[in-house]
Image (cartoon, rainbow, N blue to C red):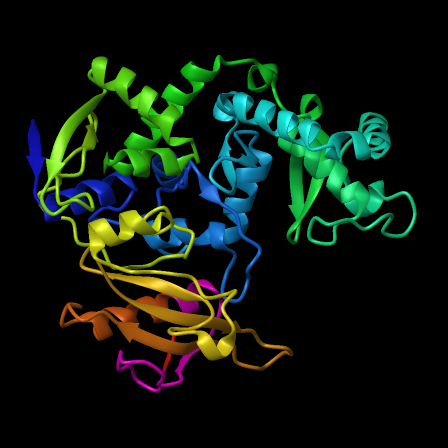
Amino acid sequence: MESLSAAEARRVGLAAQGFSNAPRLRRRRPFDAVLDALHVLQIDSVNVFARSHYLPVFSRRGDYDAAALDRHLWRGGEFTEYWAHEAAFIPVRDRALFGWRMGEFRDRFTSNGRAEALAPTIERVHSALAAGGPQFVRELEDGPRNGRGPWWDWSETKQAVEMLFAWGEVVSAGREGFQRRYALAEQVLPADALRTVEREEAQRALVEQAARSLGVATLADLADYHRLKTADARAAVGALEEQGILIPVTVAGWQRSDGAPEAAWLHRAARVPARLAPDALLTPFDPVVWFRPRAERMFDFHYRIEIYTPKAKRRYGYYCLPLMVGGRLAGRIDLKAERPRKLGERGALLVQAAWMEDRAPARTAEAAVSLLARAARWQGLDEVRVSGVGNLQLPAGFDAA
């Protein structure tokens, strides 16, 4: 059995995630490398600094035009949305791999009675989309906010269209702000994306893709990436190991709660860089940190997002971005973009709190200043202002130029 040191495992994982020693955007198809590495680009509504799906590209490749990424995701016909981890962009070519999940959603909503209760609204929404093409919920409503329900105070129309989305009958045909524009799947997707893939085959493909994106991983890591049940992921891992696609490895320091070595697998295409030490600000929904047990195991970094924590009980801040320095998770920075409200005002990136870990590299503050200035420029902000809260000592303010 092969073995890796903890440092080698970190480098393998970061390389598989699209980090490199030369972060540059190519002129032609500049987003391919990052999106191929991630496979899943999680979407989140929080916009206190920048929408979450924009950050993984920035973290790995530096400044770019966010509008260009939107065009690539929405107008090229290569990506769509589905419940792949949470709500996420995925390649259209892989949408069929989630057919079994669509079936599970249908079974769940049928068995709990929600599908029957919403049947008239579902039929009306389906007919409206068939006749009128892609539409927003506001265009599908039958009267003002008809029949609010228990799902986040959603109207019956919103509940119905989201149910159809979960079943795979309806897809997102773009967004306005954060509102989806809905369409019937056959109206916007190619026939290949509507095909049926047998459950076990699909889950093997998803576990293999998770292994490619993680480089080296435990069973729990592989299951979490596309939110598979552990038993399903275990069966897929066994089949992929027999085929030589996944290689069993041990990683120094990766242990179970009983002290025994934690089983792990290396994808056969993974590489072990001799040196890989990227600096980056990460979204809380980056695959590097979204599975908290992996972040703790690989980086000794205990991370929780505190958006839903009452202010008085927050330890680090409302929207803390993990700070990577030299390939290690060295701190967390609570950011907010203060955009100009009128012509002539200066926009600022507010550092509401800045924290560093006990074993953070000596150059952590220097790296943070550089990354914050770059982030401010990327967002079209003129300066960085620092509150002084936290144990990471940064200048009180500096220009983004």
Asked if residue 334 lies in the magenta stretch, the reply is no
Task: Name the residue located 58 percent from the left edge and 55 percent from the top edge.
Answer: 45
Q: Quadrant of the N terminus?
A: top left
Q: Quadrant of the C terminus?
A: bottom left
Q: Is residue 172 above or below residue 244?
A: below
Q: Position of residue 398 (x, y in %)?
A: 35, 82
Q: Position of residue 219 (x, y in %)?
A: 28, 33
Question: Looking at this view, is 294 or 10 the one in front?
Answer: 294
Q: Position of residue 309 (x, y in %)?
A: 49, 68
Is residue 118 something that shows in the picture?
no
Residue 332 lies in quadrant: bottom left
Residue 232 lies in quadrant: top left
Residue 63 appears left or right of 324: right
Task: Name the residue located 70 percent from the left edge and 48 percent from the top edge.
Answer: 151
Question: Looking at this view, is 10 or 66 the one in front?
Answer: 10
Residue 123 appears left or right of 391: right
Q: Secondary structure of the magenta portion, mostly? A: loop
Range of residues picked out in magenta: 375-397
Task: Name the residue located 72 percent from the left edge and 32 percent from the top edge.
Answer: 183
Residue 270 lies in quadrant: top left
Is residue 267 something that shows in the picture?
yes
